[in-house]
Image: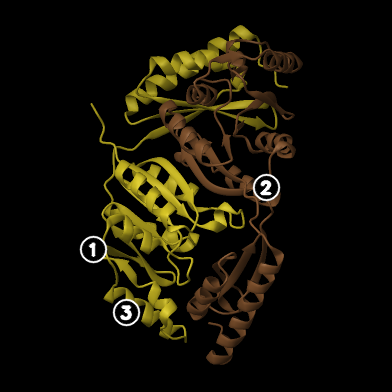
Chain colours: A brown, B yellow
Amino acid sequence: MTAAIVTASILVIGDEILSGRTKDKNIGYIAEYLTALGIDLREVRVVPDIEDEIVAALDALRRRYTYLFTTGGIGPTHDDITADAVAKAFKVPLEFHPEAVRIISERAKAMGTEMNEARMRMARIPKGAALVANKVSGAPGFQLDNVIVMAGIPTVMQAMLDIVAPTLKTGVKMVSETVRADAREGDVGTELGAVAKAHPDVIIGSYPFFDDKLGPNTNIVVRAREPEKLAAARADVEAMLKRVKAQMGAWKGS
Amino acid sequence: MTAAIVTASILVIGDEILSGRTKDKNIGYIAEYLTALGIDLREVRVVPDIEDEIVAALDALRRRYTYLFTTGGIGPTHDDITADAVAKAFKVPLEFHPEAVRIISERAKAMGTEMNEARMRMARIPKGAALVANKVSGAPGFQLDNVIVMAGIPTVMQAMLDIVAPTLKTGVKMVSETVRADAREGDVGTELGAVAKAHPDVIIGSYPFFDDKLGPNTNIVVRAREPEKLAAARADVEAMLKRVKAQMGAWKGS
């Protein structure tokens, strides 16, 4: 049985992430969110506020994966150029979207400010795109083909993702289980490699961590789309750990 | 005067980041670290534990930027394939590095475990690379040409970065100053764009934030390599803010 696979990528747009001034909080959030939906995140890129760089990354990622999620660059200032870049990548005009104009105007009024040229920037949407509502601060994101353009502010991005999620194609969910090795990575690595080779439809990852009680320890994560394959691999991992640790004698914490 | 510009990129390698299981803490740390050194971080990519993907990203990034820093995939298990990918990208053999074998063997002994096949994996270093010491857990990273290969565990990565930093070429530092607008982005966006256009050698970014007292507020970040250009742009930003806010009447917090 071949499971339907839906893939995704993330493009983070913004000088502030590359300078280190702002620490990204969106990649990890979206990654976990997509995994829960049954969408495989395959690649992430972070690029500066330079139109050609954004266009090149948009084109590379939107052609390769089922979905591309972008964050950042959709505010009212001169350095917000994501909509311009998307329009350029798709070779469509950037137009004032009447519904976006209405939403942003009403929001400005409600906030006691005025609609002006800067706020109108946020209503410029590539032709053919559908708006993605922003329940937090008004100015919408948008979706054009397989590209979903979201805000960079985490609370706003999260609200937009909730709006888009029910409309996304999803694949068979990757199920994952974690086996705590109670051994060091280096003690079980070779044997774990043999188990991984014996289960080609299962992804087996090994993640060292520092255990306050035992010292260096390892989490072995087993992931698969088919529960029976997952269970078989997990059983083999556990049998291997038992065998290797018996050979080593009692586990010696450091 | 043209300032010497040194650029960098980061390649994060690991399924666990893309699945959301592990939240990356290295990108923001390296970004801030390089900025402080006077190295411009220009691009970041995150790719899975798939050799062809790693090789393609290595080649794209190492050719384009002064330095490429990688994190992840240098442990003792089957999913640690960064050294293999670097050797393949540079078309050099992957060999047991005598000094790495010595370091890892001594470490294993000190920890009361044995040198074995899995630990020997960590001593496989692309031919011609120089080791990067790991004061935290022994197994070294390495540098080949302009590619610096570091561990994924933040404490180990940070120790490796400290070792490499003094050897890096650095450019003229980007100096940055933050002006708190006490205005909403949408109220000052157009005028800020005009100031940015008048100062082409200065990078002006606008970052909205929520102010507990005033409500929506904006940080304007002015960045430049030449202090006098920075000062001139900052003065224009401040004059602009004064002018716009006077026109708007008293600042109305929401």
Q: Distance between the residues labelled 1 and 3?
A: 18 Å
| Figure quadrant of the N terminus of chain B | top left
Relative to B211, does residue B139 appear above or below in the rendering? below
- Asked if residue B165 shows in the view, the reply is no
SS for tag 2?
helix
Question: Which three-letter amino acid code belongs to the residue tagged 2?
Answer: Tyr
SS for tag 1?
loop
Occupied quadrant, residue A51: top left
> Please, which chain is the residue tagged with disc 2 on?
A
Where does residue B110 sit, x and y in percent of width and height? 42, 84
Q: Which mark is residue B102?
A: 3
Q: Which residue is painted at 76% across and 16% down in the image?
A: A110
Q: In this view, does A135 lie to the left or right of B73?
A: right
Where does residue B18 sit, x and y in percent of width and height? 56, 52
Comparing labels 3 and 2, the label whose residue is closer to the camera:
2
For mark 1, what is the residue?
Answer: B128
Which is more toward the observer, B11 or B227?
Answer: B11
Q: Do callouts 1 and 2 point to residues on the same chain?
A: no
